[in-house]
Image (cartoon, helix red, strand yellow):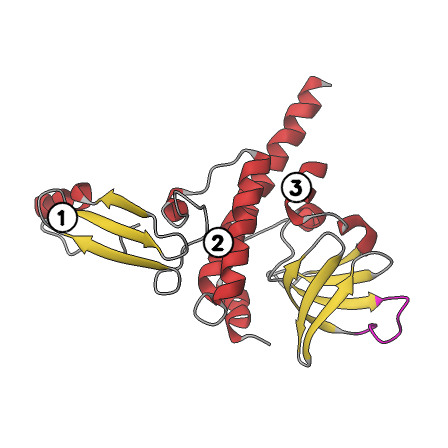
Amino acid sequence: MRRAVRRSKQRERRIARERIVWLLTLADAVAPERPDLAKRYGELARRISLRARVRIPRRWRWRYCRECKSYLIPGVNAAVRTRPRRMPHLVIRCLECGAITRRPYLREKRRKLRFKMPAEGRPE
Amino acid sequence: MINAFEEFYRRVKIPRKPSDLIYHELIGLKVEVESSPDPDQVGLSGVVVDETHHLLVLETRRGRRLIPKSHRVFLFTLPSGRRVRVLGDKIVGRPEERVKRI
């Protein structure tokens, strides 16, 4: 019986993970046209992650405001700036509550220097 | 219909099992109302753009429609093109709550 419980738990978390990826991908796809819906989807994804005890994938980790937990869409309710000096970092400012978070990108920069490769993708 | 949803449907291929559907995400799926106590709603089709405990919010060609989940039969189209018939009463419940009901 215990095994059955564990299996259903696994299924639950697998579905939760799929739903979160689905919702956040959709959120980013509709963000330019419908920022209101995108925010709603971000919120739903977070609620699913809390209920099913599943982490938000790292790609989307910085997309939630550390203070007010709203889903951030750069250009709509968030401002993202790079600060290249000393400890290079991104400054992410939530335009809902004004909170500021900083994310270093030194690692990415070092990697780039080592391999002399063009930067690929976005700072996620 | 909103273009971004069409685009998403065509481009994003996140596989999912038909048997998971009633615990899975309904937002973004195409749906047709197959039967309803309200004859006006039968045959209505569109994309699910939002969901509450008792309602599906559909974006149809003629604007937004709120359809109660209970006492309806829905025909969902998965991104794979497969169509799944779902009893509306089975998907009653808040979206984040549904995943806990397995």
Q: Which mark is residue A24?
A: 2
B65 vs B28, nearest the viewer: B65
Chain of the residue under the numbered disc 3 shown in the image:
B
Evaluate whether label 1 is on the same chain as label 3. Answer: no
Q: Nearer the viewer, mark 1 or mark 2?
A: 2
Secondary structure beneath dot 3 equals: helix
- Residue to which mark 1 is pinned: A112
Q: Which mark is residue A53?
A: none
Image location (x, y in percent) of residue A67: 40, 43
Q: Quadrant of the C terminus of chain B?
A: top right
Residue B37 in the image, given as x and y percentages of width and height: 91, 66
Q: Amino acid at mark 2?
A: Leu
Which type of secondary structure does the marked residue at label 2 adopt? Answer: helix
Q: Position of residue A34 (x, y in %)?
A: 50, 69
Gap between marks 3 and 2 measured at Cα: 17 Å
Q: Chain of mark 1?
A: A
On screen, residue A83 versus residue B25, left or right, reads left
